[in-house]
Image (cartoon, rainbow, N blue to C red):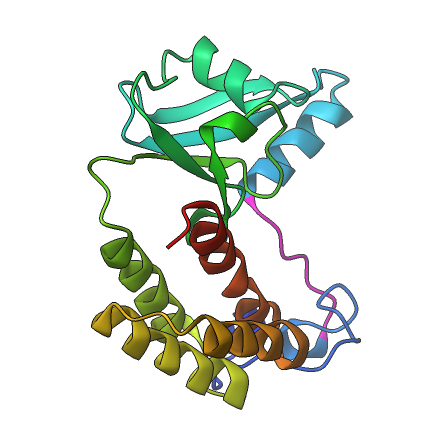
Amino acid sequence: VVCQEIEHRIARPRTRPPYPGQAGIDGYPTLINNIETFYYINQIAKNKYNKKRFYTISGDVKKPGVYELPLVWSIEKILKATGNLPIKDYFLQIGGGGSGEILLSSEINQKVDGSGAIIVFDKAKTDVYKLMKFWILFFMRENCDKCTPCREGTYRMLKMIEQKKLDKKALNDLFYVLENTSFCALGRSVVVPFKSLITKLKI
């Protein structure tokens, strides 16, 4: 998609292989990565790599920001060390921003994978239907409309969220289709936050 944007073509995912490293912009090998990876490659090249990574902490916390901390630290240790461990009842979204998994306060003795994002939600202040609507509108806006599961599945989820009537059987069917038949990773990632939120908060 990034290559097609740069080439001024319709931004839609393509079948892989070939991967961008083999055939990217204008058919040439193209390196597509994030700034954190380039930074740590530079550290490794200089023999200065210290087995740390960046964590982004946001949401209902006292000290939001980006922190460089050890790879092996648990979520609980990260929140304590940064002065962000909530006192009130809360839940987290980790690993991928809006597409990240929901964890309860009892599940924070584990590491953060993915993008290293930790979003904290105060249970008492969070309207879960507003949160789900925020997520689903993001996925609807970002999907390319190429495949039916993503295009139609997200629309049907939006209608249920707006009506505050979650048909569990219909949702599970949508989750299955999105996970197994979406053309790209965006459609598959829709399932993660919704399934974990609905299950763990018993909505």
Q: Which residues are magenta?
A: 28-34
Side (left or right) of 113 relative to 93:
right
Can residue 119 be spotted in the picture? no
Q: Does 6 appear above or below 112?
A: below
Q: Look at the image and tell me in which quarter the C terminus lies.
A: bottom left
Q: Does 83 appear above or below 35?
A: above
Foreground of the two, 22 or 95 = 95
Q: Does 144 appear above or below 118?
A: below
Q: Would you identify the image quadrant in which residue 116 lies?
A: top right
Per the image, is 185 magenta?
no
Per the image, is 31 magenta?
yes
Q: Main secondary structure of the magenta part?
A: loop
User: Which residue is at 68% across, 72% downward?
Assistant: 24
Side (left or right) of 15 relative to 200:
right
The x, y position of residue 145, in whole percent, is 45, 86
Q: How many marks?
A: 0
Q: Would you identify the image quadrant in which residue 74 lies?
A: top right
Q: Would you identify the image quadrant in which residue 1 lies?
A: bottom right
The x, y position of residue 141, in whole percent, is 34, 73
Q: Does 100 appear above or below 186?
A: above
The x, y position of residue 15, in whole percent, is 71, 82
User: Which residue is at 61% across, 74% downward?
Assistant: 176
The x, y position of residue 115, in whole percent, is 55, 42
Can residue 116 be spotted in the picture? yes
User: Which residue is at 35% across, 60% downward?
Assistant: 135
Side (left or right) of 48 relative to 178:
right
Foreground of the two, 83 or 5 = 83
